[in-house]
Amino acid sequence: MGALPPPTDEELRDAARIVEAFRAAHKLPMLTARMGLQSCVSTKRYVIGRDAEITQRLKRRLTVWDKLRREPTMKLSRMQDIGGCRAVLPSLNAIAQVRDRFTANSRRRDNREDRVIDYVEHPRDSGYRAVHIRTHYRGRRVEVQLRTRWQHRWARIVEDLTNRVGVDYKSGSGPEDVHRLLIVMSDTFAERDAQGQDPAALDNELRGLMAQVAEAGGLGVIAGTTNIEELGWT
């Protein structure tokens, strides 16, 4: 069979309208999920509400298009994270508490088990750590992410590196030296999490490791500095 002809302008416009309508259909379920997450975090029983950061987002249009391009067999209706919420929590124990309360609420709400993917117990090859909860609100899939501050710091560094250099480190692209350093950083952050240390107290060892990542990733050339404070990694 020959290659399929490229889509016409009208077909592209129709596809764009479908993607936008699908994104819009997730807005209310996402907001409802955020309220449910906020309830789990703010309950007096766990006393962690004042120490948590909760956000929500619809997957960006370009990100949706890019994922469909990278995974040709992916169906738009099967994407798990069009709508997403995140809680950045003060400890691993807080993650466990919020996870258990959130999934219990889901069982009571619609007699359905959430799917929990534990990237803390089983990190991705990249070093990414978090707990993902794939749940449903109002008939739509919503993904809830639970991270500690250390895990969130690592994810923001990788995202920042990707955005500044234009290399998709999040998907495994880029020099092996950078990925090796990011894995070492992830392991180091995980040790600090287990010890209950606050990332606000970054020491010289961590600053040196972060500077190595910046230099290996090319930020010394792009940003003109590997100073961690100037890069915004503190």
Image: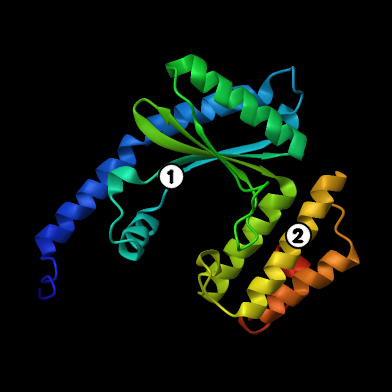
Q: Quadrant of the N terminus?
A: bottom left
User: Which residue is at a point 39% across and 35% down the rendered structure image?
Assistant: 141
Report whether residue 219 is seen. Answer: no
Kindly indicate the quadrant of the structure image that contains residue 67: bottom left
N-terminal of the pair, mark 1 or mark 2, is 1
User: Which residue is at a point 57% across and 20% down the rendered structure image?
Assistant: 104
Q: Local crowd at mark 1 within 10 Å, few (<14), some, or many (≥20)? A: some
Amino acid found under the numbered disc labelled 1: Asp
Mark identifier at residue 207:
none
What is the total number of numbered labels drawn onto the structure image? 2
Mark identifier at residue 187:
2
Say whether residue 175 is left or right of residue 208: left
Considering the numbered disc 2 on the image, is that residue within a helix, a strand or a loop? helix
Q: Residue 77: x percent and y percent?
A: 29, 43
Q: Residue 127: x percent and y percent?
A: 65, 60
Residue furthest right as drawn: 204
Q: Residue 120: x percent and y percent?
A: 67, 47
User: Which residue is at a point 71% across and 74% down the rendered structure image?
Assistant: 213
Considering the numbered disc 1 on the image, is that residue within a helix, a strand or a loop? loop
Q: Residue 13: x percent and y percent?
A: 16, 57
In front: label 1 or label 2 = 2
Amino acid found under the numbered disc labelled 2: Asp
The residue where tag 1 is placed is: 81
